[in-house]
Amino acid sequence: RAADGDVFGRLDGRVVLVTGAASGIGAASMRLFRAVGAEVVGVDLTAGEGIVQADVSDPAQVAEVVDGVVARHGRLDVVHGNAGINVPGRPHSITDDDYRKVMGVCCDANFYLVRSAVRHMRTDGGVFVFTSSMCGVAATPRSPVYNMAKHALIGLAQSVAVDYGAQGIRAVALVTGPTHTGMVDELWPPGPLRDSLIATTSTGRLATPEEQARAAVFAALPGSSFLTGCALTVDGGATA
Ligand code: NAI
């Protein structure tokens, strides 16, 4: 296929599940997975076109969504675990509730996705892509639980790779850099805070959600067949 310029292949006939699909990187991921031929089901707190309503921090809801996708579409090939939230504050100010919320969405949800989805992938191979973060390799101030959770996603990608690699299942954690989404608008509003975030990059700008979604698609395409158990950095040079 490389001869006709199709180096990475496509996902025609494959089924993709994207969490946090209603906005930002997840919404772009849905669009781009469709562009390479996949049938895509989104998950978010509110339902929308192609998006199922569920709270991914609840294991029962994750199991129901995954089983529902397989019942309706007959298979599940790629899971992009992307939903995330942050509650800023230094460790001493984080309440039990905030701790559980951030761990629940950023970390636990992705474990639940693996547990529910992996058995459906056993005969066909499959790919997990997790939206980790620069915070998964180096701490951002005032984000202790988010930092912990994002580190955990790199461990989860490694675990999936070593435990299921022989079955053709791959897993990649995206070390995502500053990206213009609702999360950044809320936590780094335009002004000095936003400028300090942009200044961390070599590109002098935020990524677009599409630039991050392309990395998710790249990781999942058949041509990335030796890419697994790794952290793929897409940060405009911010950690360089
Ligand atoms: P966003 O806020 O636009 O998207 C997050 C989505 O997750 C929202 O649609 C939200 O409703 C959904 N969500 C939150 N809690 C959920 C739950 N319990 N169940 C189901 N869905 C839930 O933000 P963005 O930036 O697109 O975030 C996507 C991922 O990218 C997150 O994991 C975030 O941590 C990560 N990330 C973002 C960066 C950035 O600069 N924007 C940098 C590094 C990582």
Image (tube, helix red, strand yellow):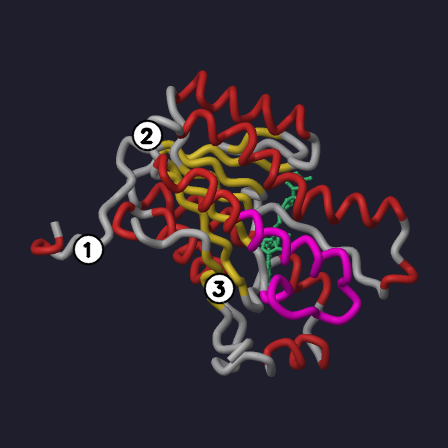
Pointer 2 and pointer 3: residues touching (CB < 8 Å)? no
Distance in Å between CA atoms under marks 2 and 1:
21 Å
Q: Position of residue 152 (x, y in %)?
A: 63, 52
Q: Nearer the viewer, residue 14 or 145?
A: 145
Q: Which residue is mark 2?
A: 124
Say which of 12 and 210 sits in front.
12
**Is residue 209 a member of the stretch shown in magenta?**
no
Residue under label 3 = 208
Q: CA distance from mark 3 to mark 1?
A: 24 Å
Q: Could you say where residue 21 lies in the image, as x and y percent from the top left?
A: 54, 42
- Magenta stretch secondary structure, dominant: helix
For label 1, the crowd category at 10 Å Cα-Cα, with few meaning under 14, some 14 to 19 and many 20 or more, is: few
Extreme residue toward the top, this view: 71
Dot 3 or dot 1: first in sequence order is 1
- Which is more toward the observer, 39 or 102? 102
Question: What residue is shown with label 1?
Answer: 7
Asked if 106 appears above or below 234 in the picture, the reply is above
